[in-house]
Structure formats: C-alpha cells, structure tokens
Image: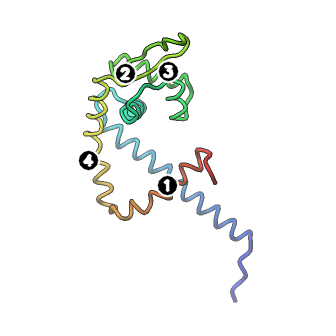
Amino acid sequence: MNKPVTDIDKRQATDRLAASLFAEVLIAEQLSRNLISKALPRGMQISHFSVLNLLAHVNEERTPAQLAEAFHITRGAMTNTLSRLEWAGHVHIRPDWDDARRKFVSISTAGRSARDAAIAAFMPLIAEVVRDIGADRVRSALPVLRELRIRLEGGPG
C-alpha cells in the first residue's frame, strides 16, 4: 500500500534536490577554475582575466568601485587586482579630472592582447567540453543556470 506524500516529504525531496544542484554547481565551478587557471598565460590569474574581459567587453572606463561591485568583491580586493594589472601594463588607471578622490580604469593595448591570448589558451578546452556534452544539452541548461545566477544576485524571484 502506498502511503500519501506529505508536505514534509515534498520539502525533504526539494532540500535534497537543492543540495544536489548546489553541490554540482560548486564542483563544476572549482573544476572549471582549475582548467582555466592551468591554461592561462604565465602570471595571469582568473581574477585578472575577468577584469580584462569585462573592460574589453564594455570598451569604456570603469571606476574601481564599479568593478568591485560587478564582481561582488570588496574594493580592497579589486584595488589589489588592479595594482597587479597596472604593474603588468594591462590597464591604465587615471584620476577623475572632476573629483581627485576617484579613479578610472581602462584596458590597455597590452591588456587586450593578454586577454586575447588567455581566451586562445582556454577556449579550445571549454569548447571541447561543450562538444562532448552536446550543444543542444548545454543550450537547454543555460536558462536554468542564468536564472540561478539572477536569483543569487538578488534579482526577481
């Protein structure tokens, strides 16, 4: 005889599903970072690439505070990353001519080249993963992953 499914049973099943989802996302994130880190040009970290990639995409200056907010990190952590990128010649940091307390960051020609080299190094590896899984399956997973990201960012839910 089948026993009726209770609200507690449903909640426990949902909890197990949530735990499985987040375990898979966390493990995939760690393995992805490891794969990409190994492929990046010497001396480049994922945080460096991420900043260069964002600056290349927006193709306009950003303040360190805007960059920190975009990556959900502290201003101090962003300042550290920007200092390393500036030292490597990958970004230009200039004062705001209207407010000396503020700075603006832009990607340099060398930074754009470094970003392009990084993409060339790891893109074949991640493209192979997508080919192995299948483009249609990856495409069908993207809306769920995108909604998960939006919810975690505090978006509509």
Circle 3: residue type: Thr
Which image quarter is the C terminus in?
bottom right
Query: According to the image, label 1 marks what residue?
Result: 145
Residue depth check, mark 3 versus mark 2: number of the one nearer the observer: 2
Above or below for 80 versus 2: above
Residues at marks 4 and 3, CA–CA distance in whole angstroms: 31 Å
Circle 1: residue type: Leu
Decide: few, some or many residues near mark 3? Use Cα within 10 Å; few <14, some 14-19, many ≥20: some
The front one of 140 and 32 is 140
Residue depth check, mark 4 versus mark 2: number of the one nearer the observer: 2
Residues at marks 4 and 2, CA–CA distance in whole angstroms: 26 Å
The front one of 31 and 134 is 134
**Does residue 46 appear in this view?**
no
Query: According to the image, label 2 marks what residue?
Result: 91
Q: Is residue 154 left or right of residue 117?
A: right
Residue 121 position in % (x across, y down): 26, 39
Decide: few, some or many residues near mark 2? Use Cα within 10 Å; few <14, some 14-19, many ≥20: many
